Amino acid sequence: MGANVALDFPDEVVTHAYVRYAQLPGVDGPVALITLDNGHDHTRPNTFGPAGLRELLAAVDEIEAHTPAVAAVAVAGKPFIFCVGADLSFRSSITDPDAIRPAIEALGELGHAALRRVGEGRLNGRKVPTFALVNGAAMGGGLELALHCDYRAFSAGIPVLALPEVFLGLVPGWGGTQLLPNLVGAEKAVRVAIENPLNTNRTLKGPQAAKLGLADVLLEPADFLEEALGWVGRVLRGELDPAASRPAVERGAAWADALARGRALADAKLHGAAPAAYRALDLMALAETADRDTGYAAETAALADLSVSDELAASLYAFDLTQKRARKPVGGPDSKLARPVAKVGVVGAGLMASQLALLFAQRLEVPVVLTDLDRARLDKGVTYVHGEIDNLLLRGRVSPDKANRLKALVTGSLTKDAFSDADLVIEAVFEDLKVKQTVLAELEAVVRPDALLLTNTSALSVTEMAAGLAHPERVAGLHFFNPVAVLPLVEVVRAARTDDASVATTLAVARKLGKNAVLVKDAPAFVVNRLLTRFLGEVLGAIEAGTPVAEADAALDSLGLPMSPLTLLALVGPAVALHVAETLHEAWPDRFRSPAGLARVVAAGKTSIYTTGPDGTPVVDEEAAALARAGTGDGAGAGSAVAPSSAEVRENALAALAREIRLLLDQGVVAEAPDVDLCMILGAGWPFHLGGITPYLDRTGISDRVTGARFSPPGVATVG
């Protein structure tokens, strides 16, 4: 096994385990309190690497030797942070493929040993109660440490609590798959360890986790540690018995049904494309009857197997992109050039414009003024924003005072004169070049000379929009994705004459809005929409040629994409997709086919190629399918001998993506291939287990075969 492997990790930021002793009233003996602290503030959370786990073991050794003997052991974290789990950079630091499995196996065994040593509370042959005082963020191995303890107190202020391992191509490997279902039942365990990670890594807050039964008590964040130690004292004095109030765990059929639901979720999300979720479910099945030694050994074996998978290598690559590259866009000018923004204008009051106004008001907390052509549209937009703020208040996301302040910040005006003192104005009007040129010209006539002018265009040329202005250097693109509040990506578009100060200001604003920005050169449809349109064009082209709708739509299921191409089409909206497709066809007719079938679907007022069947499930809308096929919409072409097979649709779509990405990079639309991956992960939901689009095309040999070269050197997002 891995126990004899030397675990050397010189770059580890060690999470220390400091021990102090507290004498609680009426308790015979002190309580040992272990505080986890890596010496950094909350922006560098506690994580466990080999040295940190050894410190945890040493802390218990110290407690065991303490005189007088302790009455209990409790563990807490530094301010705002409990522990967010294993240090993932440990796996990334292992460059020898042959060393990966034994090292991860050894780390799995060390993690189990350390967490068990704390949580099982066996000191000098006697059992003492153990308590997890979870004061802040707890993820992965941090939450598993809490699960090992006998009792758990959670702060109501915990912002993030999760077992995210499946999202990253791993399993909860330090006891999570065994302890969680035996604490809260298999159904809730599936929700935390399978469903949430597969739903774009959804997390819980303290009150939500407590409601699921993960905590024995929920305490307010103010004076949390003092209150938690008071609760520990009541338990030790016998005044409380938290375990007695826990509901019984249902086994047998209920356990099996929960795991079956988990497998159905995994199938729906992944189509078998990634193994981690299925391994986690196997481990949870084992947990129903296995003892801890057996279950923990199985977890370690699963970790070792997954550690040498391309899925994990790809996921770690994607994780690194979203945690590092996304926070510091490549190619941006000096951030010191950014100008302050104390007032924002939004041209338009439709849904997109209203979403933008809400985001600017929430994040920047500056006055935001909307304009539109008439009072009815304007009032509708302002009312939408105020209504969304009221919803935030109802959900407890903002205080009544803040809700009132936010609503006061968002106002409307029928004239653009209201922008005369704005520092930034963004237009979100109809996607028509002449309309946008007119709007920008009108803005230039009223705004200050140093005001930044932004467009939210999804496909049009920002350079052409600004061509007729006296100061085109202050115009940039800030392309949001819908829904604005949810999707984390913005494409910051540098037009031909945009100056450094305008780019720096746009990037700074994107960061303050809580978005991840990728700097792109002005080119039709930029990155995400350009690639999605090329991809979707192959699927729609196959349907036009006669491939059955369901077959063409399912052709890429084996990739485990978050949704099928036609589901994505319905989400984006066929009319929006048509606009982008027409723009790209006009720019590059040799690569982007005429979207004739899609145009017929839009002209007929169809919002999807699917409709809802009698049982509530999606079924092909035969009328829409006929419109999407070649000819006049009567189904001509269906069953044609030239109709691509499902395998051909998949190969054609991936080959088209490879060609388009090569051209996109050659044209300098983004700095490097990882920027393409970042755009697709954050803007299109490209799954972590693929590592982005370019590593997948490299691993499968498509990029080399189609373009003559890889996008990245061997070893990027692969095991070796």
Image: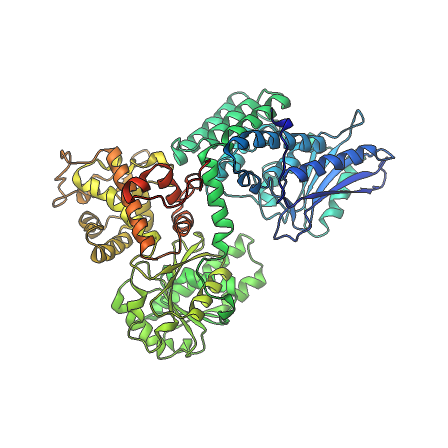
Q: How many marks?
A: 0
Could you tell me if residue 308 is visible in this image? yes
Residue at 46 percent of width and 35 percent of height: 719
Identify the coloring. Answer: rainbow
Residue 435: which quarter of the image?
bottom left
Q: Nearer the viewer, residue 616 or 87?
A: 87
**Could you say where residue 254 lies in the image, as x and y percent from the top left?**
52, 24
**Could you say where residue 102 lies in the image, as x and y percent from the top left?**
57, 29
Could you tell me if residue 258 is visible in this image? no
Identify the image quadrant of the N terminus.
top right
Residue 517: which quarter of the image?
bottom left
**Could you say where residue 197 lies in the image, as x and y percent from the top left?**
49, 39
38 is higher (above) or lower (below) than 349? above
Q: Nearer the viewer, residue 139 or 680?
A: 680
Residue at 33 percent of width and 44 percent of height: 709
Residue at 51 percent of width and 28 percent of height: 305
Q: Nearer the viewer, residue 452 or 380?
A: 452
Q: Nearer the viewer, residue 135 or 52?
A: 52
**Could you say where residue 252 lies in the image, as x and y percent from the top left?**
53, 20
Residue farthest to the right, as pictured: 68
Q: Is residue 169 left or right of residue 142?
A: left
145 is higher (above) or lower (below) than 597? above
Q: Is residue 275 left or right of residue 84?
A: left
Identify the image quadrant of the C terminus.
top left
Residue at 32 percent of width and 41 percent of height: 704
